[in-house]
Amino acid sequence: MKKIITTASNFKYFIENDGYYVDKTPEIKEFFELSDQIILMPRPRRFGKTMFLSTIKYLTSKKVAEKELFKETSIYETEFFNENFGKYPVIHITFKDVKEDNFDLMLEKIKYFIKKEVENLLENIDIKDKILQNILEDKASQIDYENSLKALTEALTEYYKTPCIVLIDEYDSPVIHAYIKGYYEKAIGFFRNLLSAVFKENDLNIKKALLTGILRVSGESMFSGLNNITTLTILEKDLSTSCGFSIKETKQLFKYYNISDELQKEAFDFYNCYIFGDTEIVNPFSILKFIKYKEFEAYWANTASNDFIYFLIQNSPEFKKNLEKLLRNEEIDIEVNKNITFKGKEIFQKDNVFSLLFFSGYLKCKEKYFKNINAEQYLYCKMIPTNIECKMIFRKVIANYVRDNFNNQNIQEALESLTNGNLEDFTYFLEELLLETSYHDLKTENSYHMFLLGILTNLSDEYEIISNTEAGYGRVDIILLHKEDKTKPAIVMELKKIRHETKDEALQKAVKQIQEKNYIELAKKRGYKNIIAFGLVFDGKRCWIKEVKTTY
Protein backbone atom coordinates (compact mmCIF):
# COMPACT_ATOMS: atom_id res chain seq x y z
CA MET A 1 0.00 0.00 0.00
CA LYS A 2 1.33 3.42 -0.94
CA LYS A 3 2.41 5.86 1.75
CA ILE A 4 0.50 8.98 2.72
CA ILE A 5 3.02 11.84 2.51
CA THR A 6 2.02 15.29 3.75
CA THR A 7 5.44 16.70 4.58
CA ALA A 8 6.91 16.96 1.07
CA SER A 9 5.94 18.86 -2.10
CA ASN A 10 8.67 17.62 -4.43
CA PHE A 11 7.25 15.37 -7.16
CA LYS A 12 10.42 13.26 -7.49
CA TYR A 13 10.66 12.68 -3.74
CA PHE A 14 6.97 11.79 -3.64
CA ILE A 15 7.19 9.15 -6.38
CA GLU A 16 10.53 7.66 -5.32
CA ASN A 17 9.24 7.25 -1.76
CA ASP A 18 6.11 5.44 -2.95
CA GLY A 19 3.68 8.20 -1.99
CA TYR A 20 0.04 8.10 -3.07
CA TYR A 21 0.01 10.58 -5.95
CA VAL A 22 -3.28 12.05 -7.11
CA ASP A 23 -2.62 12.41 -10.82
CA LYS A 24 -2.57 16.08 -11.88
CA THR A 25 -0.68 15.54 -15.14
CA PRO A 26 -3.82 16.10 -17.28
CA GLU A 27 -3.92 19.62 -15.81
CA ILE A 28 -0.35 20.17 -17.06
CA LYS A 29 -1.61 19.50 -20.56
CA GLU A 30 -4.49 21.88 -19.89
CA PHE A 31 -2.01 24.55 -18.73
CA PHE A 32 0.03 24.22 -21.94
CA GLU A 33 -3.05 24.31 -24.15
CA LEU A 34 -4.31 27.58 -22.66
CA SER A 35 -3.64 30.40 -25.12
CA ASP A 36 -2.38 32.61 -22.28
CA GLN A 37 1.40 32.76 -22.03
CA ILE A 38 1.72 34.01 -18.43
CA ILE A 39 -0.74 32.83 -15.79
CA LEU A 40 -1.19 33.82 -12.17
CA MET A 41 -3.05 31.10 -10.25
CA PRO A 42 -3.91 32.06 -6.65
CA ARG A 43 -5.05 29.16 -4.44
CA PRO A 44 -5.39 28.62 -0.68
CA ARG A 45 -2.35 27.41 1.21
CA ARG A 46 -1.60 23.67 1.44
CA PHE A 47 -3.64 22.85 -1.66
CA GLY A 48 -0.82 21.42 -3.78
CA LYS A 49 0.42 24.49 -5.64
CA THR A 50 4.07 23.61 -5.00
CA MET A 51 3.53 19.98 -6.03
CA PHE A 52 1.88 21.09 -9.28
CA LEU A 53 4.83 23.33 -10.20
CA SER A 54 7.28 20.59 -9.24
CA THR A 55 5.47 18.11 -11.49
CA ILE A 56 5.65 20.54 -14.43
CA LYS A 57 9.37 20.94 -13.80
CA TYR A 58 10.15 17.20 -13.74
CA LEU A 59 8.15 16.68 -16.93
CA THR A 60 9.50 19.55 -19.04
CA SER A 61 12.96 20.49 -17.73
CA LYS A 62 16.01 19.79 -19.89
CA LYS A 63 18.07 19.55 -16.72
CA VAL A 64 16.04 17.33 -14.35
CA ALA A 65 13.30 15.62 -16.41
CA GLU A 66 13.00 11.93 -15.47
CA LYS A 67 10.76 9.73 -17.58
CA GLU A 68 10.44 6.92 -15.05
CA LEU A 69 8.75 9.22 -12.55
CA PHE A 70 5.69 9.45 -14.81
CA LYS A 71 5.17 5.74 -15.60
CA GLU A 72 1.98 5.49 -13.51
CA THR A 73 0.45 8.77 -14.66
CA SER A 74 -2.21 9.13 -17.33
CA ILE A 75 -0.03 11.44 -19.41
CA TYR A 76 2.84 8.96 -19.78
CA GLU A 77 3.82 8.24 -23.41
CA THR A 78 0.96 10.35 -24.77
CA GLU A 79 1.55 12.61 -27.74
CA PHE A 80 1.73 15.63 -25.42
CA PHE A 81 4.22 13.88 -23.14
CA ASN A 82 6.51 12.90 -25.97
CA GLU A 83 6.41 16.38 -27.48
CA ASN A 84 7.19 18.24 -24.25
CA PHE A 85 9.22 15.84 -22.12
CA GLY A 86 12.60 17.38 -21.22
CA LYS A 87 12.28 20.01 -23.90
CA TYR A 88 12.67 23.35 -22.08
CA PRO A 89 15.00 25.23 -19.77
CA VAL A 90 12.92 25.67 -16.60
CA ILE A 91 13.38 28.46 -14.06
CA HIS A 92 11.75 27.42 -10.78
CA ILE A 93 11.89 29.72 -7.74
CA THR A 94 9.85 29.65 -4.53
CA PHE A 95 9.39 32.58 -2.17
CA LYS A 96 7.28 30.69 0.39
CA ASP A 97 9.95 30.92 3.12
CA VAL A 98 10.66 34.63 2.63
CA LYS A 99 9.02 36.04 5.76
CA GLU A 100 11.49 38.51 7.20
CA ASP A 101 11.14 41.33 9.72
CA ASN A 102 12.61 44.05 7.50
CA PHE A 103 13.32 44.81 3.86
CA ASP A 104 17.08 44.24 4.01
CA LEU A 105 16.63 40.73 5.39
CA MET A 106 13.93 40.00 2.79
CA LEU A 107 16.23 41.13 0.01
CA GLU A 108 19.13 39.03 1.28
CA LYS A 109 17.02 35.88 1.33
CA ILE A 110 15.63 36.55 -2.16
CA LYS A 111 19.18 37.13 -3.44
CA TYR A 112 20.14 33.75 -2.01
CA PHE A 113 17.32 31.92 -3.82
CA ILE A 114 17.96 33.70 -7.13
CA LYS A 115 21.71 33.10 -6.99
CA LYS A 116 21.12 29.42 -6.19
CA GLU A 117 18.89 29.07 -9.27
CA VAL A 118 21.37 30.94 -11.47
CA GLU A 119 24.23 28.67 -10.30
CA ASN A 120 22.14 25.57 -10.87
CA LEU A 121 20.90 26.44 -14.36
CA LEU A 122 24.11 27.94 -15.71
CA GLU A 123 26.46 25.22 -14.49
CA ASN A 124 29.03 24.45 -17.23
CA ILE A 125 27.61 27.21 -19.43
CA ASP A 126 29.83 30.09 -20.54
CA ILE A 127 28.16 33.25 -19.27
CA LYS A 128 28.66 36.58 -21.03
CA ASP A 129 25.83 38.53 -19.40
CA LYS A 130 27.20 41.12 -16.95
CA ILE A 131 24.21 40.88 -14.56
CA LEU A 132 24.54 37.12 -14.21
CA GLN A 133 28.32 37.39 -13.81
CA ASN A 134 27.83 39.92 -11.00
CA ILE A 135 25.39 37.57 -9.25
CA LEU A 136 27.76 34.60 -9.47
CA GLU A 137 30.65 36.73 -8.19
CA ASP A 138 28.61 38.32 -5.34
CA LYS A 139 28.99 41.78 -6.89
CA ALA A 140 25.35 42.28 -7.89
CA SER A 141 23.38 45.37 -6.90
CA GLN A 142 19.66 45.44 -6.11
CA ILE A 143 19.02 46.61 -9.69
CA ASP A 144 20.98 43.60 -10.99
CA TYR A 145 18.72 41.28 -8.99
CA GLU A 146 15.60 43.08 -10.21
CA ASN A 147 16.72 42.25 -13.76
CA SER A 148 18.12 38.81 -12.93
CA LEU A 149 15.22 36.64 -14.10
CA LYS A 150 15.00 38.42 -17.43
CA ALA A 151 18.77 38.02 -17.92
CA LEU A 152 18.46 34.34 -17.02
CA THR A 153 15.66 33.72 -19.58
CA GLU A 154 17.76 35.43 -22.26
CA ALA A 155 20.88 33.40 -21.47
CA LEU A 156 19.04 30.07 -21.35
CA THR A 157 17.03 30.73 -24.51
CA GLU A 158 20.20 31.64 -26.40
CA TYR A 159 22.07 28.56 -25.17
CA TYR A 160 19.32 25.96 -25.67
CA LYS A 161 17.70 27.61 -28.71
CA THR A 162 14.28 27.23 -27.14
CA PRO A 163 12.29 29.56 -24.83
CA CYS A 164 12.01 29.00 -21.07
CA ILE A 165 9.30 27.91 -18.73
CA VAL A 166 9.17 30.18 -15.68
CA LEU A 167 7.63 28.84 -12.45
CA ILE A 168 7.34 31.16 -9.44
CA ASP A 169 5.82 29.70 -6.28
CA GLU A 170 4.24 31.74 -3.45
CA TYR A 171 5.08 35.04 -5.12
CA ASP A 172 2.92 36.95 -2.59
CA SER A 173 4.30 35.48 0.64
CA PRO A 174 7.01 38.16 1.08
CA VAL A 175 4.55 40.93 0.20
CA ILE A 176 1.92 39.87 2.75
CA HIS A 177 4.58 39.56 5.43
CA ALA A 178 6.02 42.94 4.44
CA TYR A 179 2.58 44.49 4.91
CA ILE A 180 2.31 43.09 8.43
CA LYS A 181 5.85 44.18 9.32
CA GLY A 182 5.57 47.66 7.84
CA TYR A 183 7.84 47.67 4.78
CA TYR A 184 5.21 46.99 2.13
CA GLU A 185 6.12 49.84 -0.23
CA LYS A 186 9.77 48.77 -0.46
CA ALA A 187 8.79 45.12 -1.04
CA ILE A 188 6.25 46.06 -3.71
CA GLY A 189 8.82 48.23 -5.44
CA PHE A 190 11.29 45.36 -5.68
CA PHE A 191 8.77 42.79 -6.91
CA ARG A 192 7.20 45.22 -9.38
CA ASN A 193 10.61 45.72 -10.98
CA LEU A 194 11.50 42.00 -10.86
CA LEU A 195 8.26 40.82 -12.47
CA SER A 196 7.99 43.67 -14.97
CA ALA A 197 11.51 42.99 -16.20
CA VAL A 198 11.00 39.27 -16.81
CA PHE A 199 7.43 39.37 -18.14
CA LYS A 200 7.14 42.65 -20.04
CA GLU A 201 8.16 42.49 -23.72
CA ASN A 202 10.06 39.24 -23.15
CA ASP A 203 7.80 36.96 -25.22
CA LEU A 204 10.57 35.38 -27.28
CA ASN A 205 12.33 34.06 -24.19
CA ILE A 206 9.30 32.57 -22.40
CA LYS A 207 7.28 29.59 -23.60
CA LYS A 208 4.93 29.53 -20.59
CA ALA A 209 4.97 31.03 -17.10
CA LEU A 210 2.96 30.10 -14.00
CA LEU A 211 2.90 32.08 -10.77
CA THR A 212 1.17 30.76 -7.68
CA GLY A 213 0.28 32.32 -4.35
CA ILE A 214 -2.69 32.84 -2.09
CA LEU A 215 -3.87 36.23 -3.33
CA ARG A 216 -3.93 38.35 -6.44
CA VAL A 217 -2.16 41.45 -5.23
CA SER A 218 -3.76 44.31 -7.14
CA GLY A 219 -2.47 45.34 -10.54
CA GLU A 220 -1.83 48.95 -9.55
CA SER A 221 1.00 47.72 -7.34
CA MET A 222 2.57 44.32 -8.00
CA PHE A 223 1.87 44.06 -11.74
CA SER A 224 2.01 47.71 -12.70
CA GLY A 225 2.50 48.08 -16.44
CA LEU A 226 1.85 44.41 -17.20
CA ASN A 227 -1.17 43.57 -19.33
CA ASN A 228 -0.09 40.12 -20.46
CA ILE A 229 -0.74 38.25 -17.20
CA THR A 230 -3.96 36.23 -17.00
CA THR A 231 -5.30 35.61 -13.50
CA LEU A 232 -7.18 32.39 -12.81
CA THR A 233 -8.69 32.74 -9.32
CA ILE A 234 -10.94 30.16 -7.66
CA LEU A 235 -13.83 31.78 -9.54
CA GLU A 236 -12.54 30.69 -12.96
CA LYS A 237 -13.07 27.25 -14.51
CA ASP A 238 -9.64 26.96 -16.18
CA LEU A 239 -7.19 24.88 -14.10
CA SER A 240 -9.87 24.55 -11.42
CA THR A 241 -8.80 20.96 -10.61
CA SER A 242 -5.03 21.53 -10.71
CA CYS A 243 -4.88 22.00 -6.93
CA GLY A 244 -6.86 20.11 -4.31
CA PHE A 245 -8.78 16.87 -4.79
CA SER A 246 -12.03 16.51 -6.69
CA ILE A 247 -14.87 14.50 -5.15
CA LYS A 248 -14.04 11.61 -7.49
CA GLU A 249 -10.34 11.69 -6.54
CA THR A 250 -11.24 11.80 -2.85
CA LYS A 251 -13.58 8.82 -3.13
CA GLN A 252 -10.84 6.87 -4.91
CA LEU A 253 -8.53 7.69 -2.01
CA PHE A 254 -11.12 6.47 0.50
CA LYS A 255 -11.60 3.25 -1.44
CA TYR A 256 -7.85 2.59 -1.74
CA TYR A 257 -7.35 2.99 2.02
CA ASN A 258 -10.54 1.08 2.95
CA ILE A 259 -12.32 3.96 4.66
CA SER A 260 -15.84 2.88 5.67
CA ASP A 261 -18.90 4.54 4.14
CA GLU A 262 -19.83 5.94 7.55
CA LEU A 263 -16.41 7.56 8.05
CA GLN A 264 -16.46 8.88 4.49
CA LYS A 265 -19.75 10.67 5.15
CA GLU A 266 -18.43 12.12 8.41
CA ALA A 267 -15.26 13.28 6.66
CA PHE A 268 -17.21 15.09 3.94
CA ASP A 269 -19.45 16.65 6.62
CA PHE A 270 -16.48 17.78 8.72
CA TYR A 271 -14.14 19.02 5.99
CA ASN A 272 -16.83 19.98 3.49
CA CYS A 273 -15.93 21.23 0.04
CA TYR A 274 -14.47 24.33 -1.52
CA ILE A 275 -15.77 25.56 -4.88
CA PHE A 276 -13.15 26.25 -7.57
CA GLY A 277 -14.82 27.41 -10.77
CA ASP A 278 -17.92 25.24 -10.65
CA THR A 279 -16.11 22.16 -9.25
CA GLU A 280 -16.26 20.90 -5.68
CA ILE A 281 -12.71 20.60 -4.34
CA VAL A 282 -11.61 18.93 -1.10
CA ASN A 283 -8.70 20.20 1.00
CA PRO A 284 -5.94 17.64 0.21
CA PHE A 285 -3.92 18.21 3.37
CA SER A 286 -6.84 17.60 5.73
CA ILE A 287 -8.14 14.56 3.87
CA LEU A 288 -4.72 12.89 3.74
CA LYS A 289 -4.17 13.57 7.44
CA PHE A 290 -7.61 12.17 8.26
CA ILE A 291 -6.97 9.00 6.25
CA LYS A 292 -3.62 8.58 7.99
CA TYR A 293 -4.83 9.06 11.57
CA LYS A 294 -8.58 8.25 11.28
CA GLU A 295 -9.36 11.17 13.58
CA PHE A 296 -11.37 14.31 12.93
CA GLU A 297 -9.16 17.28 13.73
CA ALA A 298 -8.57 20.72 12.27
CA TYR A 299 -5.42 19.67 10.42
CA TRP A 300 -5.44 22.61 8.00
CA ALA A 301 -6.17 25.01 10.85
CA ASN A 302 -3.00 23.89 12.59
CA THR A 303 -0.62 24.28 9.63
CA ALA A 304 1.79 27.16 9.26
CA SER A 305 0.51 30.28 10.98
CA ASN A 306 -2.61 32.35 10.66
CA ASP A 307 -0.71 35.58 11.32
CA PHE A 308 -2.51 37.47 8.59
CA ILE A 309 -5.97 36.48 9.89
CA TYR A 310 -4.80 37.41 13.39
CA PHE A 311 -3.66 40.75 11.97
CA LEU A 312 -7.09 41.32 10.42
CA ILE A 313 -9.04 40.66 13.58
CA GLN A 314 -6.90 43.19 15.43
CA ASN A 315 -7.26 45.90 12.81
CA SER A 316 -10.55 45.42 10.98
CA PRO A 317 -13.79 46.68 12.60
CA GLU A 318 -15.81 44.93 9.87
CA PHE A 319 -14.14 41.61 10.62
CA LYS A 320 -14.86 41.89 14.34
CA LYS A 321 -18.44 42.95 13.68
CA ASN A 322 -19.19 39.99 11.41
CA LEU A 323 -17.13 37.31 13.14
CA GLU A 324 -20.02 36.17 15.32
CA LYS A 325 -22.21 35.80 12.22
CA LEU A 326 -19.55 33.59 10.64
CA LEU A 327 -19.35 31.41 13.73
CA ARG A 328 -23.13 31.02 13.58
CA ASN A 329 -22.89 30.05 9.90
CA GLU A 330 -24.93 33.09 8.91
CA GLU A 331 -24.50 34.47 5.40
CA ILE A 332 -22.61 37.70 4.74
CA ASP A 333 -23.35 39.50 1.47
CA ILE A 334 -20.07 40.57 -0.09
CA GLU A 335 -19.12 42.34 -3.29
CA VAL A 336 -16.24 40.18 -4.52
CA ASN A 337 -13.09 42.15 -5.22
CA LYS A 338 -10.57 40.19 -7.29
CA ASN A 339 -8.03 43.01 -7.10
CA ILE A 340 -7.00 42.96 -3.46
CA THR A 341 -5.14 46.13 -2.58
CA PHE A 342 -2.90 46.68 0.43
CA LYS A 343 -2.68 50.40 -0.19
CA GLY A 344 -3.33 52.48 2.92
CA LYS A 345 -6.26 51.06 4.86
CA GLU A 346 -8.23 49.89 1.82
CA ILE A 347 -7.79 46.26 2.80
CA PHE A 348 -9.86 46.85 5.94
CA GLN A 349 -12.92 47.93 4.03
CA LYS A 350 -15.71 45.41 4.47
CA ASP A 351 -15.72 43.80 1.06
CA ASN A 352 -11.93 43.74 0.74
CA VAL A 353 -11.49 41.92 4.04
CA PHE A 354 -14.02 39.24 3.21
CA SER A 355 -12.91 38.96 -0.40
CA LEU A 356 -9.43 38.26 0.94
CA LEU A 357 -10.80 35.59 3.28
CA PHE A 358 -12.72 34.09 0.36
CA PHE A 359 -9.72 33.81 -1.97
CA SER A 360 -7.58 32.52 0.91
CA GLY A 361 -10.00 29.63 1.49
CA TYR A 362 -11.51 30.63 4.83
CA LEU A 363 -14.91 31.50 3.33
CA LYS A 364 -16.85 30.03 0.45
CA CYS A 365 -19.53 31.38 -1.81
CA LYS A 366 -22.84 29.73 -0.97
CA GLU A 367 -24.65 31.66 -3.69
CA LYS A 368 -23.39 34.18 -6.22
CA TYR A 369 -25.35 36.84 -8.07
CA PHE A 370 -24.77 40.05 -10.00
CA LYS A 371 -25.87 43.60 -9.31
CA ASN A 372 -26.17 46.28 -11.97
CA ILE A 373 -24.77 49.54 -10.66
CA ASN A 374 -24.39 52.52 -12.99
CA ALA A 375 -24.73 50.28 -16.05
CA GLU A 376 -21.98 47.95 -14.83
CA GLN A 377 -22.23 44.44 -13.42
CA TYR A 378 -20.71 43.61 -10.03
CA LEU A 379 -20.29 40.11 -8.60
CA TYR A 380 -21.73 39.46 -5.15
CA CYS A 381 -21.55 36.33 -3.01
CA LYS A 382 -23.37 35.09 0.06
CA MET A 383 -20.36 34.00 2.12
CA ILE A 384 -20.20 31.41 4.91
CA PRO A 385 -17.24 29.67 6.58
CA THR A 386 -15.93 27.03 4.20
CA ASN A 387 -16.20 24.23 6.75
CA ILE A 388 -15.84 23.29 10.42
CA GLU A 389 -12.07 23.64 10.17
CA CYS A 390 -12.33 27.27 9.12
CA LYS A 391 -14.75 28.07 11.94
CA MET A 392 -12.21 26.55 14.31
CA ILE A 393 -9.55 28.86 12.86
CA PHE A 394 -11.74 31.89 13.57
CA ARG A 395 -12.30 30.71 17.14
CA LYS A 396 -8.60 30.02 17.60
CA VAL A 397 -7.77 33.53 16.41
CA ILE A 398 -10.19 34.97 18.98
CA ALA A 399 -8.63 32.82 21.70
CA ASN A 400 -5.12 33.93 20.70
CA TYR A 401 -6.18 37.56 20.74
CA VAL A 402 -7.62 37.22 24.24
CA ARG A 403 -4.62 35.21 25.47
CA ASP A 404 -2.10 37.73 24.13
CA ASN A 405 -3.91 40.79 25.46
CA PHE A 406 -5.11 39.69 28.88
CA ASN A 407 -3.67 38.29 32.09
CA ASN A 408 -3.44 34.56 31.47
CA GLN A 409 -3.66 33.77 35.17
CA ASN A 410 -7.01 35.55 35.41
CA ILE A 411 -8.25 33.65 32.35
CA GLN A 412 -7.30 30.29 33.84
CA GLU A 413 -8.83 31.10 37.22
CA ALA A 414 -12.02 32.38 35.59
CA LEU A 415 -12.36 29.19 33.55
CA GLU A 416 -11.61 26.93 36.52
CA SER A 417 -14.23 28.72 38.61
CA LEU A 418 -16.81 28.43 35.84
CA THR A 419 -16.29 24.73 35.13
CA ASN A 420 -16.39 23.97 38.88
CA GLY A 421 -19.70 25.81 39.19
CA ASN A 422 -18.28 28.56 41.44
CA LEU A 423 -20.17 31.48 39.91
CA GLU A 424 -19.15 34.01 42.56
CA ASP A 425 -15.44 33.53 41.80
CA PHE A 426 -16.17 33.42 38.08
CA THR A 427 -17.83 36.85 38.33
CA TYR A 428 -14.82 38.26 40.20
CA PHE A 429 -12.22 36.99 37.69
CA LEU A 430 -14.36 38.00 34.72
CA GLU A 431 -14.50 41.56 36.07
CA GLU A 432 -10.71 41.50 36.47
CA LEU A 433 -10.46 40.65 32.77
CA LEU A 434 -12.97 43.34 31.84
CA LEU A 435 -10.80 45.91 33.61
CA GLU A 436 -8.03 45.11 31.10
CA THR A 437 -10.36 45.73 28.16
CA SER A 438 -10.74 48.95 26.20
CA TYR A 439 -14.18 50.59 26.38
CA HIS A 440 -14.05 50.77 22.59
CA ASP A 441 -14.16 46.97 22.46
CA LEU A 442 -17.30 46.77 24.65
CA LYS A 443 -19.90 48.75 22.76
CA THR A 444 -22.53 46.08 22.09
CA GLU A 445 -23.92 42.84 23.46
CA ASN A 446 -22.17 41.13 20.57
CA SER A 447 -18.77 42.52 21.65
CA TYR A 448 -19.25 41.03 25.12
CA HIS A 449 -20.28 37.78 23.49
CA MET A 450 -17.11 37.69 21.40
CA PHE A 451 -14.96 38.67 24.40
CA LEU A 452 -16.42 35.81 26.45
CA LEU A 453 -16.20 33.39 23.54
CA GLY A 454 -12.51 34.22 23.18
CA ILE A 455 -11.94 33.28 26.82
CA LEU A 456 -14.01 30.09 26.58
CA THR A 457 -12.19 28.92 23.46
CA ASN A 458 -9.31 28.02 25.78
CA LEU A 459 -11.54 25.13 26.92
CA SER A 460 -12.06 23.76 23.41
CA ASP A 461 -9.85 20.69 23.98
CA GLU A 462 -12.17 19.44 26.73
CA TYR A 463 -15.47 21.18 26.09
CA GLU A 464 -17.83 21.56 23.16
CA ILE A 465 -18.53 25.28 22.88
CA ILE A 466 -21.97 25.94 21.41
CA SER A 467 -22.62 29.56 20.46
CA ASN A 468 -25.89 31.14 19.44
CA THR A 469 -27.64 27.96 18.42
CA GLU A 470 -31.20 26.64 18.62
CA ALA A 471 -32.10 25.16 21.99
CA GLY A 472 -35.60 24.60 23.37
CA TYR A 473 -37.80 27.29 21.85
CA GLY A 474 -35.16 29.85 20.94
CA ARG A 475 -31.48 30.59 20.36
CA VAL A 476 -29.28 30.31 23.43
CA ASP A 477 -26.16 32.50 23.67
CA ILE A 478 -23.60 29.98 24.96
CA ILE A 479 -23.59 26.36 26.14
CA LEU A 480 -20.54 24.43 27.41
CA LEU A 481 -20.65 20.62 27.37
CA HIS A 482 -17.78 18.42 28.52
CA LYS A 483 -16.83 16.16 25.60
CA GLU A 484 -16.28 12.98 27.61
CA ASP A 485 -17.59 13.28 31.18
CA LYS A 486 -21.34 13.92 31.39
CA THR A 487 -21.16 14.19 35.17
CA LYS A 488 -19.29 17.48 34.73
CA PRO A 489 -21.57 20.54 34.88
CA ALA A 490 -23.21 21.54 31.62
CA ILE A 491 -23.24 25.34 31.55
CA VAL A 492 -25.97 27.42 29.92
CA MET A 493 -25.56 31.23 29.63
CA GLU A 494 -27.79 34.03 28.45
CA LEU A 495 -25.98 37.37 28.00
CA LYS A 496 -27.42 40.87 28.32
CA LYS A 497 -25.97 44.37 28.11
CA ILE A 498 -27.68 46.98 30.26
CA ARG A 499 -29.36 49.63 28.17
CA HIS A 500 -32.06 51.59 29.94
CA GLU A 501 -33.02 49.06 32.63
CA THR A 502 -31.36 48.40 35.97
CA LYS A 503 -29.00 45.47 36.47
CA ASP A 504 -31.68 43.61 38.45
CA GLU A 505 -34.20 44.10 35.66
CA ALA A 506 -31.66 42.90 33.07
CA LEU A 507 -30.77 39.85 35.19
CA GLN A 508 -34.43 38.97 35.65
CA LYS A 509 -34.98 39.34 31.90
CA ALA A 510 -32.10 36.94 31.15
CA VAL A 511 -33.31 34.37 33.70
CA LYS A 512 -36.87 34.56 32.41
CA GLN A 513 -35.65 34.00 28.85
CA ILE A 514 -33.75 30.85 29.88
CA GLN A 515 -36.86 29.51 31.63
CA GLU A 516 -39.47 30.43 29.01
CA LYS A 517 -37.34 29.33 26.05
CA ASN A 518 -36.29 26.15 27.88
CA TYR A 519 -32.62 26.58 26.90
CA ILE A 520 -31.51 23.72 29.14
CA GLU A 521 -33.34 21.23 26.91
CA LEU A 522 -30.34 20.79 24.60
CA ALA A 523 -28.08 19.71 27.49
CA LYS A 524 -30.78 17.41 28.89
CA LYS A 525 -31.21 15.70 25.50
CA ARG A 526 -27.45 15.12 25.36
CA GLY A 527 -27.65 13.24 28.68
CA TYR A 528 -26.24 15.85 31.08
CA LYS A 529 -27.86 15.79 34.52
CA ASN A 530 -25.83 18.48 36.31
CA ILE A 531 -26.85 21.68 34.53
CA ILE A 532 -25.89 25.19 35.65
CA ALA A 533 -27.89 27.91 33.91
CA PHE A 534 -27.52 31.63 34.55
CA GLY A 535 -28.04 35.10 33.19
CA LEU A 536 -24.89 37.18 32.74
CA VAL A 537 -25.36 40.95 32.59
CA PHE A 538 -22.72 43.51 31.56
CA ASP A 539 -22.47 47.24 32.07
CA GLY A 540 -19.16 48.79 31.02
CA LYS A 541 -16.51 46.89 32.95
CA ARG A 542 -18.91 45.43 35.51
CA CYS A 543 -20.82 42.16 35.34
CA TRP A 544 -23.36 40.28 37.43
CA ILE A 545 -24.73 36.75 37.43
CA LYS A 546 -28.11 35.37 38.46
CA GLU A 547 -28.52 31.60 38.51
CA VAL A 548 -31.70 29.94 37.32
CA LYS A 549 -33.15 27.91 40.18
CA THR A 550 -34.79 25.01 38.42
CA THR A 551 -35.04 21.30 39.10
CA TYR A 552 -33.39 19.36 36.32
Image (cartoon, grey):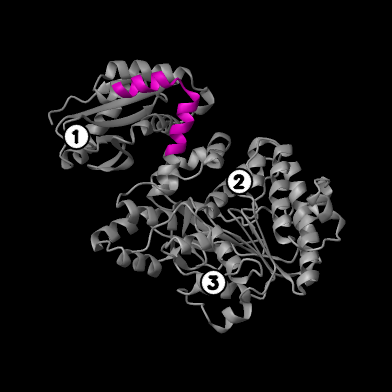
The image shows residue 184 at horizontal and vertical percentages of 71, 41
Looking at the picture, tell me which residue is in the foreground, 502 or 146: 146
Q: Which label sits on residue 221?
A: none
The image shows residue 151 at horizontal and vertical percentages of 81, 60
* Among numbered discs 3 and 1, the one appearing first in the sequence: 3
Q: Residue at x 30, y 22 (%)?
A: 416
Disc 1 crowd rating (10 Å Cα; few below 14, some 14-19, many 20+) is few
Q: Which residue is mark 2?
A: 97
Q: Which residue is mark 3?
A: 27
Q: Residue at x 73, y 47 (%)?
A: 111
The C terminus: image quadrant: top left
Q: Is residue 282 left or right of residue 64?
A: left
Q: Amino acid at mark 1?
A: Asp
The image shows residue 287 at horizontal and vertical percentages of 38, 57
78 above or below 420?
A: below
Q: Amino acid at mark 2?
A: Asp
* Among numbered discs 3 and 2, the one appearing first in the sequence: 3
Q: Magenta segment range?
A: 396-416
Q: Which of label 2 and label 1 is nearer to you?
A: 2
* Among numbered discs 2 and 1, the one appearing first in the sequence: 2
Q: Looking at the rendering, which quadrant does residue 269 occupy? A: bottom left
Q: Looking at the rendering, which quadrant does residue 83 occupy? A: bottom right
| Helix, strand or loop: magenta stretch | helix
CA separation in Å, label 3 and label 1: 49 Å
